[in-house]
Amino acid sequence: MKLRSFIVGLVISFSTVVSASTGQQIFESKCSSCHGVNTDISVAPILHGRKTEYLRKQLNDFKKGKRPDLLMDGQMVAVASELSLEDIGAVTSYLEGLEPCDFPKESADLPGDIEAGRRKAAACLSCHENWNPGLRAPNLFAQRQSYLVHTLGAFKSKSRKNSYTMTSQARRLSKMDMQDIGAFFSSVSVCE
């Protein structure tokens, strides 16, 4: 009985290591040029530390055509379409285990008032401060301001429609509101 439990544990540990290794390989070959630490593409989101379930939903939405690729001229749809469900599971699990600490901060020249953003983001925090699996809303702390402003604009214009809640919330925001909210979320460090 102990030997059987040991073998089952060993198989699970091995499959976790293989999955993490596969996830890292997929990320490095297909994703890191836009989403990696050394990229200068500021409108590509930081994926490190984001929850597996959220990332999986987004990749599946790209794959199924539910989320348009507004930033990369169809590149995300193409990449997601090449990934199997197992690949998506491996890469999203790998990303959740990473810390977003090594990403350089964006230029301080971006418009937006952090304190005004803190006040305006109060309603956002009920979904985006902590992971809520029912909502599948990502934690936005330490995300790139450029990406957040672009994404809020896409929800407002309804060019991104894969979240009714976000489309409804964004329609009320001005460009300055979006810049302020983006400035606030990007200013919050998740690292010590």
Image (tube, rainbow, N blue to C red):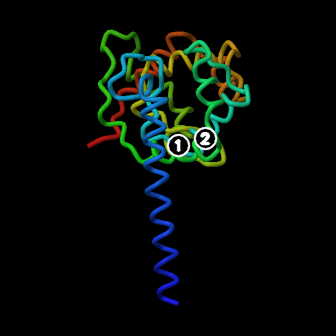
Identify the residue at image location x=55%, y=32%.
124
- Please say if the residues under marks 1 and 2 sit with CB atoms less than 8 Å apart: yes
The residue carrying pointer 1 sits among few (fewer than 14), some (14 to 19) or many (20 or more) residues within 10 Å by Cα, namely many
Q: Where residue 118 is drawn, which disc sits there?
A: none
Identify the residue at image location x=47%, y=17%.
43
Where residue 22 appears, x then y in whole percent? 48, 46
The residue carrying pointer 2 sits among few (fewer than 14), some (14 to 19) or many (20 or more) residues within 10 Å by Cα, namely some
From the viewer's perspective, tell me whether residue 14 is left or right of residue 80: left
From the viewer's perspective, tell me whether residue 1 is left or right of residue 64: left
Looking at the figure, which quarter contains the C terminus?
A: top left
Name the foreground residue: 8 vs 114: 8
Q: Is residue 12 visible?
A: yes
Q: Which residue is mark 2?
A: 56
Nearer-N-terminus badge (1/2)? 2
Quadrant hosting residue 67: top right
Identify the residue at image location x=62%, y=19%.
69
Q: Amino acid at mark 2?
A: Arg
- SS type, badge 1: helix
Q: How far apart are the two marked residues, 1 and 2, measured between alpha carbons?
A: 6 Å
Name the foreground residue: 141 vs 159: 159
| Image: 42 above or below 19 | above
Name the foreground residue: 50 vs 90: 90
Name the foreground residue: 121 vs 48: 48
Quadrant hosting residue 104: top left
- SS type, badge 2: helix
| Image: 139 above or below 7 | above
Q: Which residue is mark 1?
A: 92
Where residue 94 appears, x then y in whole percent? 46, 46
Where residue 40 appears, x then y in whole percent? 36, 16
Q: Amino acid at mark 1?
A: Thr
